């Protein structure tokens, strides 16, 4: 079983003052195309992304899903506007910016882990329904790295690094329920 977890490409900051509605910029589209090529144009069995459009755009460019490949919005990869857990993360983002997840965890661990657990449960349900073995997940830095920590039960390398645009991890597990880690590759 393989999970490829990738942060979305660069957003177009000029499109809107509201970061929730910003699409990918041309640079972000180029980043996603380059990531697909660096991954060797893989075929994914399941494609997951957050509720924000730029994660779907990134996922569609990287995965180039074929007919029948499930493409699923997973709300826990981002947070709803009035979700108190997300508000805590948002406040910290205003304070910390793109800091290492360890810094976020020191102030909002319960909220972040709750979102990560909700997310992995939703992804596991999709895996159970589809039988997917090669899963692409496109999301947002802190929550994506918390998801990686939840999948592997390991802090490192996830909690000390900062994922740039279209960066992330490939995680190979023996089986998604027992979480025996067979390998972790950092995608820079």
Image (cartoon, helix red, strand yellow):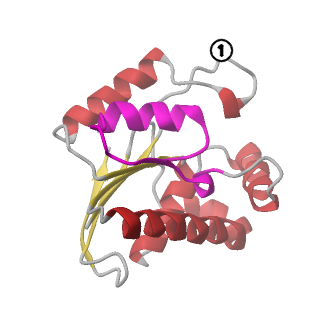
- The residue where tag 1 is placed is 14
Q: Is residue 79 left or right of residue 153?
A: right
* Position of residue 140 measured from the top left corner of the image (x, y, whole percent): 55, 46
Residue 140 in sight: yes
Alpha-carbon neighbours of circle 1 within 10 Å: few (<14), some, or many (≥20)?
few
Residue 159 in sight: no
The residue that appears at 71% across and 67% down in the rendered structure is 111
- The quarter of the picture where the N terminus appears is bottom left
Give the SS element for disc 1: loop
* Position of residue 178 measured from the top left corner of the image (x, y, whole percent): 34, 85
* Position of residue 160 measured from the top left corner of the image (x, y, whole percent): 48, 61
- The quarter of the picture where the C terminus appears is top left
Quarter occupied by residue 61 = top left
Give the camera-side residue of 22 and 188: 22
Give the residues drawn in magenta, as a range.
49-78
Q: Is residue 116 left or right of residue 158?
A: right
Give the camera-side residue of 84 and 187: 84
């Amino acid at each position: 079983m393989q999970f490829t977890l990738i942060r979305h490409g660069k957003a177009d900051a000029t499109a809107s003052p509201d970061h929730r509605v910003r699409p990918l910029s041309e640079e972000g589209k180029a980043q996603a195309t380059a990531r697909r090529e660096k991954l060797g144009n893989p075929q994914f069995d399941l494609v997951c992304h957050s509720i924000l459009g730029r994660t779907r755009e990134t996922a569609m460019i990287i995965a180039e899903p074929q007919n029948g490949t499930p493409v699923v919005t997973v709300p826990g990869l981002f947070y709803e506007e009035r979700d108190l857990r997300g508000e805590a993360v948002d406040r910290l983002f205003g304070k910390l910016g793109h800091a290492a997840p360890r810094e976020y965890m020191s102030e909002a661990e319960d909220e972040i882990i709750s979102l990560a657990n909700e997310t992995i449960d939703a992804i596991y349900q999709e895996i159970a329904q589809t039988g997917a073995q090669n899963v692409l997940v496109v999301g947002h830095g802190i929550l994506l790295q918390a998801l990686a920590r939840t999948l592997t039960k390991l802090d490192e390398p996830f909690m000390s690094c900062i994922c740039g645009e279209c960066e992330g991890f490939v995680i190979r597990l023996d089986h998604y329920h027992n979480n025996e880690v067979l390998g972790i590759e950092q995608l820079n």
